[in-house]
Amino acid sequence: MKNKMRKLIAAMALVLPFSVPALANEGGPKLEKAPIDIQDTESLQRGAQIFVNYCLSCHSASMMRYNRLEDIGLSEEQIKANLLPEGAKIGDQMNIAMDKKDAKAWFGAVPPDLSLIARSRGADYLYGYLRGFYRDPTRPTGWNNLVFDKVGMPHVFWEWQGEQVLKTEKDAEGHEEHSLQLVKAGSLTKLENGKANTVEYDRRMADLTNFLVYMGEPAAVKRQQIGYVVLMFLGLLLFPLVYLLKKEYWRDVH
């Protein structure tokens, strides 16, 4: 009986981390499918550049090393010239210099490590989060987020995206108010474009999300590539054998 209980607890421990993010999204805004393709090395390279230049100031990725970027088609020279911080080595982890006490004092909480954020939250969540910032004067930073309500993080990409606000509707007395139904539906109004139009901004956030997914399992790129080669090899190897077996099996019938 004890062995059965242990097996049941172990199974629940494996399933729970994957089921919680899905349950947490119930009742929130509908998430759009993120255009993820970790075989698209150009997208991963663009995402890596965005991550290093904008995210790595506050968020670490301690389970990722700079030299793993060679897996997405970057040379050691390119990494050193464009992505490696001053004083860092190519084999170093993607850590930040910010002290945790300072981070908590400035932001109210220590910014989370993003190494496994895509595996814990999901790509669709991240894609929606990065595109879901809107102006909210009630928040300390002046920004809120449709996917993560009362978020503490400022909108670091606002110069690209421009400004969005929640859609409003008028009540019976003609006063404008934010509609909870509209908030849940994810309805935002663009006030003005930033340096990038909506299509270009969405593409950049897709690239960043793609890179965050890659960081969650860097070996997946090579694993999938090897998998395709193995399947092709098995197909070429087995097809003649299957064909000859079919001819032998149906010889007397025909």
Image (tube, rainbow, N blue to C red):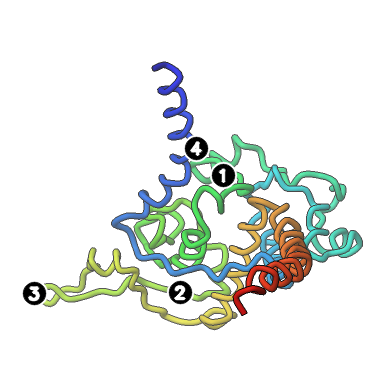
Residue identifier under label 1: 112
Q: CA distance from mark 2 to mark 1?
A: 25 Å
Q: Earlier in the sequence, mark 4 or mark 3?
A: 4
Residue identifier under label 4: 14
Residue 63's tag is: none
Q: Earlier in the sequence, mark 2 or mark 3?
A: 2
Q: Nearer the viewer, residue 79 or 86?
A: 79
Q: CA distance from mark 4 to mark 3?
A: 53 Å
Side of 130 where 83 appears, left or right = right
Q: Nearer the viewer, residue 158 or 82?
A: 82
- Residue sitting at 45 percent across and 19 percent down? 3
- Residue sitting at 72 percent across and 43 percent down? 97
Q: Nearer the viewer, residue 86 or 106?
A: 86
Tag 1: residue type?
A: Pro
Residue identifier under label 2: 163
Tag 4: residue type?
A: Leu
- For residue 57, say whether it is visible: no
Tag 2: residue type?
A: Glu
Dot 3 crowding, Cα within 10 Å, few <14, some 14–19, many 20+: few
Q: Earlier in the sequence, mark 2 or mark 4?
A: 4
**Image height check: is 241 above or below 2?**
below
Q: Position of residue 42 (x, y in %)?
A: 73, 72
Q: Are marks 4 and 1 in contact (CB under 8 Å)?
A: no
**Image height check: is 212 above or below 104?**
below
Q: CA distance from mark 3 to mark 1?
A: 44 Å
Residue identifier under label 3: 173
Q: In terms of secondary structure, where does tag 3 sit?
A: loop
Between label 4 and label 3, give the one nearer the viewer: 4
Between label 2 and label 4, give the one nearer the viewer: 4
Q: Nearer the viewer, residue 125 or 167?
A: 125
**Image height check: is 146 above or below 17?**
below
Q: CA distance from mark 2 to mark 4?
A: 41 Å
